[in-house]
Amino acid sequence: MNLSIILEILRQQVSIDELLVIGGSAKRLMWRQIMSEIFDAIIIFPSILEEAGSMVATATGGVDEGLFKDLSVIDFYLFIDFIYTSKQEAVIEYKPCQKKPY
Amino acid sequence: MLFSEHEKEIGSQVSSYNTNYFNSTWVEQDAEVCWSAVCISSKNLISTQEIDPSDIDVVSFSGQIVGCLSKDKVERPLRKSIIWADQRAQNQAAVIAEQISQKDFYHIAGHRNTDSYGIQNLMWICDNEPEIYEQIYKTLNAKDFITFRLVGNFYTEYFDGNSNGCFDLMNLKWSGRILEYVGIDPDKFPEFKPSTFIDVGVTRAAKATGFKERTPVALGGGDCITANVGAGSISLGKTYYCMGTSAWITTTEKPIFGDEMCTVTSAHIILSLYAPNGTMHSAGGVYKWVKNTICRMEMHEAKANGKSPYFYMHKQIEPPHKFKWCHFTSLPSGWKSATVES
């Protein structure tokens, strides 16, 4: 819920309709559903969930070594595995919980 | 992890190490143990993949940010590293607050003045362990310490430097104004270089790590920003959510300075960009705590049936059950209560 508040603040400056999700906890189907409904966004899951940081650290070295032109090479490594769209009735049910307590 | 420019991921190795929680709010890790983990996983990866070390074009690191690893001029960490979850430096944050308003600090550093950042922790060492403070040549974060061990020079890149809390976000340099207020010697911080910077390469520790001497070493980036780019957030508006031990949502934009200071902005690996974000400091970490502390029956069932405890926890929150779970700690939004309801 805290992160949904963060997202709403960012949305005041940037249009955000979809979120790409990484991290070990993103493996769970139930969490994927909860995320899409709390965030009211399309949730995209790449095939690499836990190794994204290491992958980019490697790519930074590859840029300086001339192996890659720039960090846009990451699109080559990024394979989208799963897309989840929120159910609007659940989105509405979460809304009252997302008010700040002060 | 081992990657090929043609074949994507080749292999990976994991070496875990412990975190010490004590005195209620103190959290430290031993940099020597971290270094050993790097050595073990590098050597194992090279041997299990049957890689010729001379075929490795470049080595780089992603590492934990927001810490205070005190180094002397030679090799030794002078004490265990104070890490991001530590909250001992509350008095030091209060001293800074006497000098500069939260709003001004936020607009310089992109982050709020709290007890979590490197500068407040370095002040704590200065105040409480002056004999160690006097010996500090540089204060580093985890990945920059590993780079030092390989190349023998002290550097950081802009994102990790930003996490020290004494960074001038708009000018990408140490903030002379904040450092003047806190009375910390600016020379105790390393020199900035871009993430893609490569110095002399491996000059030491080749035997310990399995890397060949002179293998190029790039600085890489702090964990959040490498995850940022790894999630494809390299153009304006591209947004991602990382759900791990801690969790955060980050987009790529110009700096965002909200009136309530609920979000922070960090430097980006790509120097023309910025990474505004907000965090939940204990996400997966809290869930694990719930498992270990509350879900004893689920853990018992899991052990008896050879399943994950999370399997039984998830069964209870799947429809038709409903749950309400408020958080424990989440600094940016201002929710501070520690309650769980179910």
Image (cartoon, grey):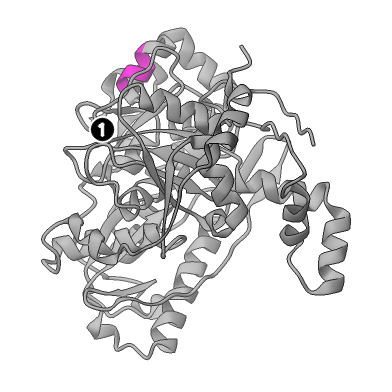
Residue A16 drawn in magenta: no
Task: Give the quarter of the image for residue B88.
Answer: top right
Range of residues picked out in magenta: B104-108
Give B205 or B337, whichever is nearer the viewer. B337
Image position of B41 with respect to B91: above or below: below
Give A19 or B93, whichever is nearer the viewer. A19
Quick one: quadrant of the N terminus of chain B? bottom left
Q: Position of residue B342 (x, y in %)?
A: 80, 37
Q: Residue at x 37, y 42 (%)?
A: A18
Image position of A2 with respect to B295: above or below: above
**Image mark 1: chain:** B
Q: Residue at x 45, y 73 (%)?
A: B39
Q: Which residue is mark 1?
A: B253
Q: Residue at x 58, y 35 (%)?
A: A89
In-image side of B198 versus B25 (left or right): left
Element class at badge 1: loop
Give A59 or B56, whichever is nearer the viewer. A59
For the stretch drawn in magenta, what is the main secondary structure?
helix
How crowded pointer 1 is (Cα within 10 Å; few <14, some 14-19, many 20+) is rated as many
Q: Position of residue A22 (x, y in %)?
A: 45, 53
Residue B105 drawn in magenta: yes
The amino acid beneath tag 1 is Glu
Q: Position of residue B285 (x, y in %)?
A: 64, 47
Total number of numbered labels?
Answer: 1
